[in-house]
Amino acid sequence: MLLIHCPHCGPRDEGEFTCGGESHIQRPALSASAEDWAEYLFLRHNPAGVTYERWRHTFGCERWFNVARCTVSHRIEAVYAMTEAKPDIA
Amino acid sequence: MRYSLLSLARKAAQGHRDWPQAWRSPEPKPHYDVVIVGGGGHGLATAYYLAKNHGVTNVAVLEKGWIGGGNTGRNTTVVRSNYLFPESAAFYDHSVKLYEGLSKELNYNIMFSQRGMITLAHTRHDLEAQRRWANAMRMNGVDSDLLSLEEMREQVPALDYSPSARFPVIGGFIQRRGGTARHDAVAWGYARAADALGVDIIQNCEVTGFDYDADGVQAVRTSRGTIGAGRVGLTASGHSTVLADRLGFRLPITSYALQAFVSEPVKPVLDKVVLSPATGVYLSQSDKGELVIGGGLDLYASYAQRGNLPTVETVVAGMLTMFPSFSRMRMLRQWAGIVDVVHDSTPVFGPAPVKRVYLNCGWGTGGFKAIPAGGWCMAHMIAKDEPHPLTAAFGLDRFAKGALIDEAAASGIAH
Amino acid sequence: MTRLPTGGLIDRSKAVRFRFNGRDYAGHPGDTLASALLANGVRLIGRSFKYHRPRGIMAAGAEEANALVQLGSGSSAEPNLKATQVPLRDGLEATSVNCWPGPRFDLRGINQLASPLLIAGFYYKTFMWPSWHLFEGPIRRAAGLGLAPEGPDPDRYVHAHARHDVIVVGGGPAGLAAAHDAALAGGSVLLVESDFELGGSALWRPEVEVAPAIAALRAMANVTILTRTEVFGYYDHNSLAAVETVMAGDGPRQRLWKLRAGKVIIATGAIERPLVFAGNDRPGVMLASAAQAYVQRYGVLPGHRIVIATNNDSTKEVASVLTAAGASVDVVDSRRGLSVTHAKGALGVKAARLSDGRTLPCDLLLMSGGWSPVVHLFSQSGGSLRYDDTIAAFVPAVARQPVECVGGAAGDLGDLNIEPEWETPGSGKKFVDFANDVTARDIAIAASENYRSVEHLKRYTTLGMGSDQGKTSNVNGLALMGELTGRAPGNVGTTKFRPPYNPVTFGALAGPLVGTLHTPIKCLPAHAWHAEQGAVFEEHGRWIRPTAYPRSGESWEAAAQREALEARTSAVLFDGSPLGKIEVCGPDAAVFLDRIYVGTASTLKPGRSRYGLMLSEHGVIVDDGIFVRLAEDRFLVHTTSGGADRIALAMEEWLQCEWTDLRVAILPATSQWAVMTVSGPGARQMIADVGTDIDLADFPHMAFREGTVAGFAARVLRASFTGEASYEISVAARHATALAQRFGRAGAVPIGVEALNILRTEKGYLHIGVDTDGTTLPDDVGMAGPIAKKASDFVGRRSLLRDDAAREDRLQLVGLLSDGPMLTVGSQVLAPGGTVPGPSDGHVTSAVFSPTLGRPIAMGLVRRGRSRKGEVVELYDMGTRLKATIVDPVFVDKAGEKLNG
């Protein structure tokens, strides 16, 4: 049971949230090659370590935000806005 | 030594002393013709069929921990081939057919029990969708039958048939050849048979990197030294992208935890494997008497092989909505495996971007049932350097083409 | 009777009556079922899992592996409970499990004869021919312990959440002290104890005084105490799960606590280990500390001639307690070179045979093989363990979460001076795992067969996988494996500790959201009115909606035919309230919708509407509906009923995550508006009849007006899913019934979902999710038209340019006409040649009997269907074959003249 610090509502149980998968993925233009389009649709970093993903506070403020989370320990390293750049996590 | 009631009795008379090793634990050799990374069912089956079907016996299977300790030993043991698309059906039905003869072939009872796999219908729309599915299965040469409400009551009496049930059962369909097998035994049976053909099974041997260049792979670096490799097969579901990173390419895979749990053992109460599409819950009863229960994936990417409570709450609520009488029974064990999830839930099978490296991954929630065919086709691909016809549609090239094989999307029912 | 005249924490002044295996007994408040049975001289409780050996009570707590009972019967049965954990209550009925007719004479006891064969791995080596499934029936019936309940659970379960600065697990001396310290620091403290009494080991060691500590804690305002509450799981971010057994009369049976702590203190004590000698499973063989607990806590002396077999100093106290209680006690200490090698006596121990050849008669044989700290929760938390030679046990090493172990759980066990003898020499069945009948020989077999990893050992022999979850067997088992393979126990390691620590009721895990509360269904605002009209209801995507309104003697199918025909000839009323309604507002609303829809929104004039198709980023059709431009900066987007929530969420995600610069707000409004659709040639007149201020003469198809209808403020859209002139009238949900009544009185015939399905199929209108699936692209259903005309990008557009989208052999939506019989949805279209098994050329997606045409019609997705019109194809449906002609999917009013009414 993760404890996620919603930037708007504060710390809440994971049951209030929805994970939207990896964040910071650039949507290519219509002119993208088939390979670039496939990369956008299907390729994810999927590290055994810190991943940068987006979450929605579904049963709360309904806002999306970014979370840096370790996929092995499930430790949350950072919570930041959708429009912010990836934080540098050692 | 051949296993039989007779050899067992003979050993019993000797006080069960000196049973021979089921497989050896050799030191790794400096070089193998083929190195398989991942000692689960797929890796061990690949090694077995390399030796058996192709005469390639200078083979090592490298396992980070203990063989069968990944998803092979962490699933709900369901075996079936009730697929809509001909590409899927041909592959998975080949697997069921291999399962049907596997105990005898390996001389190791994997306890394949074709008790039948039933999918429930709760609405008229479900009945229509299942009719399409059942017809498609027959077109694919796979057995399927629609079940009336009366047949359902007979086959699965423990379901809630009251009209006030949240998801009333109005029918269902069955693949009678579907069923369950003893998961650990599949790994051990293949290991023993592969070992007997000369394959080296190396446990506690973690792959830390590869020696490769534009001409392809040359060696595998491990916690037990560098091992030269003519060809490398990757069969490490759940951790495929970690290996791909070490080979400099990416895979369309995300790793998720898939949980399962069992009840305490009780006398027989459920004879079939039952799936409820409305709740996403599937369950069966093991020969020991435990209810074996599974549901959907955990909701975020994870490499942590441990259970989590919210998913269990959801899955149990679904089970009790279907089977209210199980409410006072108790959960005995809870665990999780890490599965490779691909967008279309179809495996990724084919040559990797690095030469002489071959992929067998992306099984999602359904790798166990695919073990025999996965090993069979992987062995073919490694030995002949070309995909087996049964897996020709499962290559990495399907993503750029958009030629996905998405059973769940087509049937509206998650697999 | 073995009840002592004094002592213990039972109330001798009151009798508690209970039944076991059909016989009446009495105990006292404060007893467990186990202590009451022992007090009544009952030693034989049941039969073992595999060999059906007679078994008694071996422990006094959660580690009990033998004494399993079934409580109650029918719908309130509870299988496989440990008698040591069942508080005695009046009227309790318990029976033995896994034996028939009873534990004394059990027909399956015959399994013991086959026991030389039933070794670890037995099943893997046999029953391969002809087929395992043939042997399974009797094997399954022999396995399985207790009986599953029959019928729905009469009790209910609830969930609760709590957050505390410190949570202390375990209310023994160490836990009480830790809780007190934590409370003094000022934070909120929760103390959780699984027993119905606080005190832990002090309950059976009265010289350890805990009453003052308990009283002090109870007086502190920042301390909460939960008893009868077992913490069974330690999860991420310092969360715990516990289950409380609630004793209040008509309340819930159990409460699942989801706890979160700043810090967790684990004070769960330690569990004594058995010794591994022949016959160590006989009734009357017991853990030494358990006997002390029965004497000191329950006032029961479980034997009079007692032999204690030990390898450590913890039994000194046991011996003195038992002697003081009046028993004669012999201590056999392996550290002095003397061991108990055999327990004699089939249904109950009668004597202990010693390694020097002597036989000591006894009626109770106690054993202590050392102690194992209860590190389960610590291990679940991610903490690592190390093997401590001084106490011969695994203890906590490095924590990964804010957690600390104290007392016995931390390995603080005093001076045990233990010298382990992991297996006592001698022949016979020496049990390591009592619950699963795993013997020392099984472990030797696993070792010689190379199942040497501790996880292989567990899985091959089933060591530790029984209903006691290996609490007494794991360390003995892995130490034996270590001895056999030349490894220290610390190098063998433990198997992974997984939740739950003790089995947890499924009902408690699920909580209240089961049955009708599982994904609750939604009712239409005018549900009662529909019921009055005789509606037959069915669920459609969580909404309960009228399927049809059969009249007396009429089937619902016939009613749907009648209703559909009414729509073609007069005026009908359809309740479309579940229709998804989302308002998209803001200066960039049009730009946003241009990116969402296949078609274009920005060119639409206010007051007009357009059909919109939505794709996923994969190009697949996910929803459709009419969107209306209410004003320059305001759109009303209609979605399918099933898509209402999903589409609003998807729009939010695009806005918040991708197009963060767009000034748009998404306002879902589905449940605010009820929609009554009046349709048919008489629709316009009927609306005029109920009264409206909207100019119906100037109200063309696909136009939108606001005004009043029957006196209610209304939004009216001219859009049609029937093919007839239709007016979708939206009013505030609270007016739904009144509006329906007005139209009903005006003579509108109510029609249900099935009639609508007939009408839209006659018109060849697509039903997303029925005529399409998750692989269907716009061109497959003939809707690629707008794409060519549109310059800009939209969701999914790039995916339509991929190779697979351009395949010529894609499935395309067409009409299908049989030469007479009804087609069935789900029938397969056979490829030319018609072999089954063989290639499929598609399938039937919709099939109805058309009342307008007086014949069956159907639609289907057929390979290259649009270029095959006129061709006769063969269909296959579960063994039957039919023929059908591929036709255009519009069966009625191809020119669409009726739409304009």
Image (cartoon, helix red, strand yellow):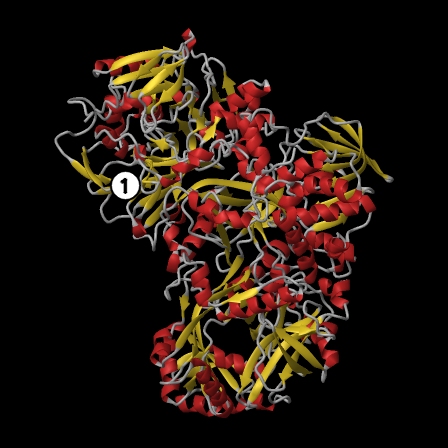
Q: Position of residue C776 (x, y in %)?
A: 66, 68
Q: Is residue C436 visible?
A: no
Q: Is residue C337 visible?
A: yes
- Callout 1 environment at 10 Å: few (<14), some (14 to 19), or many (20+)? many
Query: Above or below — where is C715 with respect to B176?
Result: below
* Callout 1: chain: C
Q: Position of residue C178 (x, y in %)?
A: 35, 23
Q: Position of residue C39 (x, y in %)?
A: 22, 28
The residue lying furthest to the top in this view is C336
Screen quadrant of the N terminus of chain C: top left
Q: Position of residue B62 (x, y in %)?
A: 70, 33
What residue lies at 32% left-to-right and 14% top-to-bottom?
C360
The residue lying furthest to the right in this view is B215
Task: Name the residue tied to disc 1.
Answer: C94
Screen quadrant of the C terminus of chain C: bottom right
Query: Above or below — where is C773 with respect to C894?
Result: above
* SS category of the residue bearing label 1: strand
Q: Nearer the viewer, residue B244 or C27?
A: C27
Query: Above or below — where is C559 with respect to B242?
Result: below
The quarter of the displayed image where residue B323 is located: bottom left
Count of numbered circles on the image: 1
What residue lies at 48% left-to-right and 21% top-to-bottom?
C394
The residue lying furthest to the left in this view is C13
Say which amino acid is labelled 1.
Ala
Q: Is residue C607 left or right of residue C558?
A: right
Q: Is residue C868 left or right of residue B289?
A: right
Q: Nearer the viewer, residue A28 or C154?
A: C154
